[in-house]
Image (cartoon, grey):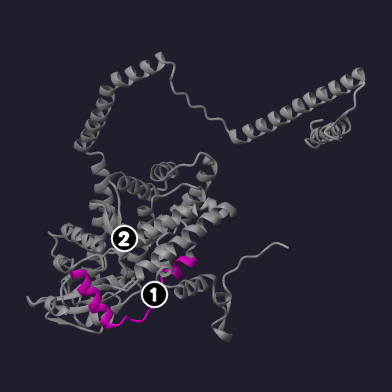
Amino acid sequence: MDKVFTLPRRVVENKRGPEGTKTMGERIRSFLEDLGPTFIKIGQMASNRPDLIPEDIMEELGQLQDEVNPFPFEDVKRIVEAELEQPLEELFDYFEEEPLGVASIGQVHKAMLYSGEYVAVKVQRPKVEKQIHTDLEILQELATRAERRLKWAQDYQVKDVIKEFSKAIKEELDYETEGRNADLMSRQFENDSSVQIPNIYWDYTSKKVLTMEFVEGIKLDDTASLQEEGVDLPQVAERLVNALFYQLFKDGHFHADPHVGNVLAVNNERLAFMDFGLMGHLSSDMKSHLAELVVAMVKQETDNMIKAIKKIGGIPEELNEHELDRDVEQFLIKYYGVPLSNISLGESITDIFRIAQEHHIKIPADLTMVGKTLLTLEGVIEKLDPDFSIIDAAEPFGRDLIREKYNPKRIAKKVFDQVHEYGDIVEDLPEVFRELSSMAKKRKLPLEINIPKADTFFAKLDQVSNRLSFAIVLLAFSLIMTGLIIGSALGRQSTMLWQVPAIEVGFVIAMLMFAWLIYSIVRSGRF
């Protein structure tokens, strides 16, 4: 009977009683929440990978919450003093013992510097780094074993996925990285008064303590409070979309988790971004390819969509062009005749990346985050202004990006860079030829031959040589025995050697070796 691998019983059990059973996504979410901070973070990051995770499970993972108890203030004080190398009383004029917010990795406290500025101090949970590193090592081992035994694990390259998630979690453990991300976003919007990024106080920041400007505002999901304060919701929606599209299509560095808890409306005038642990980056080429993909989708151009997908991802050798073409056409039928205002940009990009994944086209992680980021953005915008069209807002950014791609100055710069690169190659050619000539004269010219299934071939070759050696040894042994028999017959001497009947024993050994040789030949099926 085949073994059946299932989730632990506590995950499968029906916790809703008579009302109904849990879906697979809900079970996985509960399971990850029970396992602790590492698995919660992996679940949250996996919710940004629509190319890997089914939509229903991805939605559940997006609801993962860091519902953990705060750690004692004594630990907070000890960690802050150890990291900043000063007593807490000398660092802060005032420090609230009760945290403002608690998460699986750390918690945030309100404090005031002696200069009179209010700050938010984020302190990492004690021993969480050691726990996460241990969990990640276990996950890497499980992923390695899964790829050895399960085909789906090989197809989805589970080891690489876990490695990618591990890298992201380790970066999130370093609060200095989050501080640098905040500074980067601050420079992005230094000339835009409608966007506020909290200042980082580097003298009060370390790998486990992050001190930033305290910002008071209203969360974007609290529409009642926003309306009471007279906030123009459509204007807030427009500012949020423009800010994120500027990051995606202009700068390339973008906030990859713009949910309602990470964006505040401040003083009816500005938007304040919070939590910079999850950031994405698009290179100049990736931005251009993304724009080409969106334009081809809007224009219903199958060939151009396929070209853009190939430019974006790594193409496998076994790619079936016909099936890819059919799947893209099927995708376009879904949006045929649908007004642009009714198309979800995030959902459409996510669907395209899913098609790419089905054909084993590897999409860069930062690009897959774009789809999830846009889906999150659309969810926020729908609450603020249901009539707002994301695609209409994206159009001028995409148009500018394509115009920039074909800008003569940019083309000239790219050609110059390539000429410079080729010039370096040409400059190095004489030295390369000299080395090749010298190696050829010494008859040491390297030659690499790639033979498919070479291991199998050499294994068979070893088997043949071993059998041939065995046959030669048997022949030699037989000749020796024949010589002994003839010699003893002619000399009329006894065949006893050291009280052992040599000819009789040798005859038995020879017969056994001969029988084994015949058995091996017959068993090989090539008799």
Left of 159 or right of it: where is 130? left
**Frontmost residue, 273 versus 176:** 176
Q: CA distance from mark 2 to mark 1?
A: 20 Å
**Frontmost residue, 495 versus 126:** 495
Residue placed under numbered mark 1 in the picture:
65
In the image, what residue type sits under mark 2? Glu
Query: x, y percentage for residue 18?
Result: 58, 86
Q: Quadrant of the C terminus?
A: top right
Query: x, y percentage for residue 108?
Result: 25, 76
> In the picture shown, does residue 50 fall above or below 16?
above
Q: Nearer the viewer, mark 2 or mark 1?
A: 2
Q: In this orientation, does residue 389 appear? A: no
Q: Residue at x 44, y 57 (%)?
A: 162
- Magenta residue span: 56-84
Q: Write down the quadrant of residue 424 in the picture.
A: top left
In magenta segment, residue 63: yes
In the image, what residue type sits under mark 1? Gln
Residue placed under numbered mark 2 in the picture:
171
In magenta segment, residue 471: no
> In the picture shown, does residue 169 fall above or below 225?
above
Query: x, y percentage for residue 448?
Result: 48, 27
Label 2 vs 1, first from the N-terminus: 1
**Frontmost residue, 74 versus 500:** 500
Q: Quadrant of the N terminus?
A: bottom right
